Each structure stands twice: as C-alpha cells, then as structure tokens.
Image (cartoon, rainbow, N blue to C red):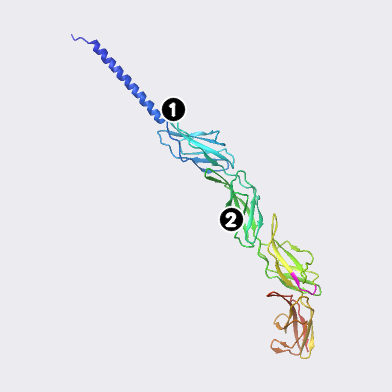
Amino acid sequence: MKMYDYDKMNLHTKRYKRAGAIMVLGFLLALFFSMSALAAPGAPSGLRQTYASEGSAKVVWNQVMGSSIRYEVEYSQDNRNWYSVGYTMTSLDCSKSGLTAGMTYYFRVRAYENQYSNKIYGPWSVGIAVATTPVQIPYQKVIQTNAGTSSVTLQWDKSAGATGYNVYQIESNQEIYIGKTAANTYTINNLKAGGTYKYKVYPERSAGGYTAVASYGTTVYDVKTVPSSVKNIFTDYGYANIKKASIQWERAENANGYEIALYSAKNKNIGSTKVINYNTNSYTFSNIKKDFYKVKVRAYIQLKTGKKYSSWSTSYIAIQPKVEGKKSGTGIKVSWDKINGATNYTVYISSKRNSGYKKATTTKSTKTIIKKYGSSRLKKGRTYYIYVIANKKVGSKTYRSSDNYTYQVRYR
C-alpha cells in the first residue's frame, strides 16, 4: 500500500497559492496601470468659433485620441467664472443658445475617458473669446448727412456691442461691398454728380479672431450726390411793356429745387434770393427794366440735415429792345430802345413772320437803315419783319437778350 508524503503535498499547495496570489496581483497592477493610462487624455487643440447669431454661438475643436472619449464644454462671461453648457458630447462641436446679442463670451473644452463606469478627465483647453452678433440697426435710423458732387456721407444709430459696420451699395438687387468702419458714419467717394444710390449697413462684433456679422442689414434709399452746376441759362422771353423776363436752364439731374439770385448791371443784389422747391427749369422775373442783369442759379438736394448746393452758375439776361421802323428812301429806318449794359445790338430781317430771318447788321448804335434782305434789295409792296437783340460780352462769352418779339414794316 502506497503511503502519501503529506509534507510534500503541503509544500505544493503553498506554491500554488503563492502563484495564484502573484497572478491576481499582476492582474490588479495591469488594471491599475491601464486605468492610469486612460486617465490622461490630452487637452483638445484647435478650439475655434465657426458660427454666431444674436443669441447663440458654435465652437469646434480637434479630436483627442482615446478608447472612449467624450467632451465637456464650459462658457464664461469674464474668463474666470465658468458654467457648463448643459450637456456632454462625442462630436467635435458644441452650440450654445440663450446668449446675449453683441457680447463676448469665453469657451473651453476638455476630454475624458468614459470606461468601467469611471470618468477620467483630461486638462482644460485654453479658453477662447467668442462673439455673438449685434442686433440690426433699426429701420430709418440710417440716414444721409452730407453730400458733394462725387461723395455722400451716411450716419446711423450705434448697435449695442458692435465693433464695426460693413457698408454695401445695392445695384440691381446685388449687394456690392464698399468698406468697413468702426465709427457710426461713413463717406463714399468717386460717385457721379446728380446720382441717386441705395446702401445697406450691417453691424458686426469681432472676438478671438472670429467676426460675427448681423444677418440682416438696414437699407437707406434715395441717397443723392449734389448735381453739377446748372448749365445753359438764357433769357427765354421778355416784354418791355409788362416788365417781365423769363429765364430757362437745363434741368439738373435729381435736384430737389433751385436758388436764384438777381443782380443789377452794377452787381447789386436785387431783392431776396428766390427758392424753387421742385425740379423745374424756368423762372420769371418781374419789374425788369431796360438793363442787362446778372442772374445766378444753383441746384440743391434736400437732406434731413438741410440743403446741399451745387456751385453757382452765372448768366446775363435782358428784355428784347422795343423796335420801331419806317420806310426811308431806299431802305427801312429802324430804331430801338437802349439796353443799359449792352455791348452792341444785332438786327434781323425776314419776309416771313416765323422763319427765314437773316442778320442785317451788328452795331453799337440804337438805329440803322436796312437796304437789303440777304443779298437782295428790298422789294416795294412787300411786308418785312424785323427784330433786334441786345448783346453783352463778358470775357470770351456773349450773352443775348430775349428774341420773342418782331416788328412788322410794309415797304412801299
């Protein structure tokens, strides 16, 4: 019968127990070091803003490597006191609503491992500044405050929290970027005189390298440049018997009205400056004597801040001289009223009332004898029509009186 060696058996049992303990200890150590490795996700990099509205902002970041990574995001108004956005995520972006328009916030993110019912956090990223968009400028709060012949100036109410404003010109429903300003006023140059334009202004706020621009701009309509100086002022008609003279000029593009000033031949202002509050092209003066007058006309546009004027344009006007005529020998003796300030007079004759006039002479006198109509001698029994205009030369330019009246003479 075989006998057991109990001492050997006890020795083997002890060895087995020792090996088991070593295995358990090794497993626990491996688990500990494994968990220690999971406990160190890095700080997320590349945190940046990608979207903003008046009440929200969105940030994104780069992925952190790990076996079961989630992210936690916090925000702050002062970069010191931090609050959770209210949820965690596995995605690489976070949107936060309930913010205030035109403000700067701060965001930060950290990663954590989520294994074995444990949350093992990594360090926070560096906080970044994040902007929300300012509110839209109220309607009709963008106005035109100034104008020149090639420029306009806009002004608007400030939008709370805005760090800048973008100005666009609208052409054929297309918004064309003009420029940006930190102030609440902007001047646009290189425009056409007498032009009408339309602009839109968008407020923005910049923070952390991101610019949050308002979704809606505010439009200002009928923005005008000052017209060019008035052109081609002339005496349209005048009658000595009623002492009235009418002037005309080329209508200035987009003008809201005109100012007209009248001066005597000695450059003395006569009466007050006349204001016409609409875009016409004529004006009639009363109490006009037998003189040349200097007249000045300028166009204006009406802004909320007042009138803006073109430069003055100057002309000289006079009533047409009254003519008398009679047959004298082989011609027609013609005389007319003297117009003070006239350089000379030009006499015209025709055999028809409304056409065919030819110049008979130009003279400094107030009378002459007409013997020919063109190259032909006057014919007895025919009726001729005569008128005289007064001329005034100023520099290299000659101004004429009105020429609406003709005198009829029958050559017997």
Which residue is denoted by mark 1 in the rendering?
A: 118
Which labelled disc corresponds to residue 216? Answer: none
Distance from label 2 to label 1 (Cα)? 58 Å
In the image, residue 343 above or below residue 12: below
Q: Is residue 197 left or right of residue 382?
A: left
Residue 169 numbered mark, or none? 2
| Element marked by disc 1 | strand
Residue 152 in picture, x, y percent from top left: 63, 57
Decide: is 347 above or below 149. Answer: below
Point out residue 195 in the picture as x, y percentages from the top left corner. Answer: 63, 61
From the viewer's perspective, is 241 left or right of 36? right
Q: How many marks?
A: 2
Q: Earlier in the sequence, mark 2 or mark 1?
A: 1
Give the percent coordinates (x, y) of residue 350. 72, 83
Question: How far across and how far down the image is residue 390, in percent?
Answer: 74, 77
Q: Write down the region rendered in magenta.
A: 289-294
Indicate whether residue 187 is drawn in magenta. Answer: no
290 inside magenta stretch: yes
- Seen from the viewer's position, the closer of residues 207 and 17 is 207
* Crowd band around label 2 with a 10 angstrom C-alpha radius: few (<14), some (14–19), many (20+): many
Q: Quadrant of the N terminus?
A: top left
Residue at image point 73% right, 70% down? 247
Image check: 1 left or right of 58? left
Return the residue found at the far left.
1
Main SS, magenta residues: loop
Q: Residues within 10 Å of mark 1 (few under 14, many from 20)?
A: few
Please identify the quarter of the rendering in which residue 187 is found: bottom right
Q: What amino acid is labelled 1 in the image?
A: Asn
